[in-house]
Amino acid sequence: EAEGFGGLLYHSMDRGIDSTGAFGVQEDTKTNKRTILYHKDTLSPADFLDTEQAAQVIFPKERKNTVLIGHNRWATVGDVTKKNAHPFVFPQIVGVHNGTIPAISLKHSPDHETDSEAFIRAVNDDGLDETLERVDKSGGAFTLAYYDKAKHTANLIRNYQRPFAIAMSSGIVYGASEMEMLRWYLDRVSKRTFTFKELEPWVLYTFSADTFSEKPKERAIKRYIASYTVG
């Protein structure tokens, strides 16, 4: 299914060509030992997918990916540099972010060039709920996808300002910011039957990286300001 991942990353090019990155949670097929391998660079998705480093992440030899997450960056906060590309790797989580978050809500902002890195560091250091309380009060926009190393889970959450959709089949989940593109692409390249779902805002979707069952755990996150919709 790695080909499908690469195709989605390529066809998401319109959402950002400043930088591209991906990470895989890889298990050794003999020892089951887990390794997180990632690559990111200031390349378009097309050029990124042609690199040997990207191939090692997406198509590992003697290992299998249990989680594979990619990101296309359209730079808003911070220069276009390899360091500022996604994913961002911290001791507890590895993640990618779409959106813009005011620096006032992120206590680590002075330490990082981008709001995304400061956001993911806050989730790593302070936990998801405490971080989202500050973000909610500031009016930040986000879709967040991250891997929890201790729990071996893949996690997705968004708010009203950013979309995200998933396609679920037995043992596999694809995701993309645009439902129409996700449907179009999988209908063209896959023979699987998928259940498509637009993520509900402010609900954390958690998938076991061992099974990727079609029924993720869902947990509503407490809101700290009045909810609203964007017209």
Image (spheres, rainbow, N blue to C red):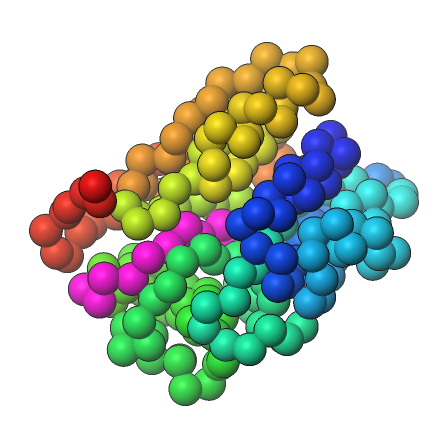
Judge whether residue 54 can be spotted in this image.
no
Judge whether residue 175 can be spotted in this image.
yes
User: Residue 163, image x and y in percent?
Assistant: 38, 42
- The vertical placement of 77 against 225, above or below, is below
Q: Quadrant of residue 184?
A: top right
The number of numbered discs placed on residues in the rendered structure image is 0
| Image quadrant occupied by the N terminus | top right
The magenta stretch spans which residues?
137-151
User: Residue 86, image x and y in percent?
Assistant: 59, 62
- The vertical placement of 9 against 77, above or below, is above
- Residue at image point 49% right, 28% down: 180
Q: 56 or 85, which is in the foreground?
A: 85
User: Along the horizontal axis of the image, is 138 left or right of 31?
Assistant: left
User: Along the horizontal axis of the image, is 31 left or right of 78?
Assistant: right
- Residue at image point 64% right, 63% down: 19
User: Residue 22, image x and y in percent?
Assistant: 67, 54
- Residue at image point 82% right, 43% down: 59
Q: 180 or 217, which is in the foreground?
A: 180
Q: Residue furthest front?
A: 14
Query: Within the magenta stretch, is there residue 96?
Result: no
- Residue at image point 52% right, 39% down: 176
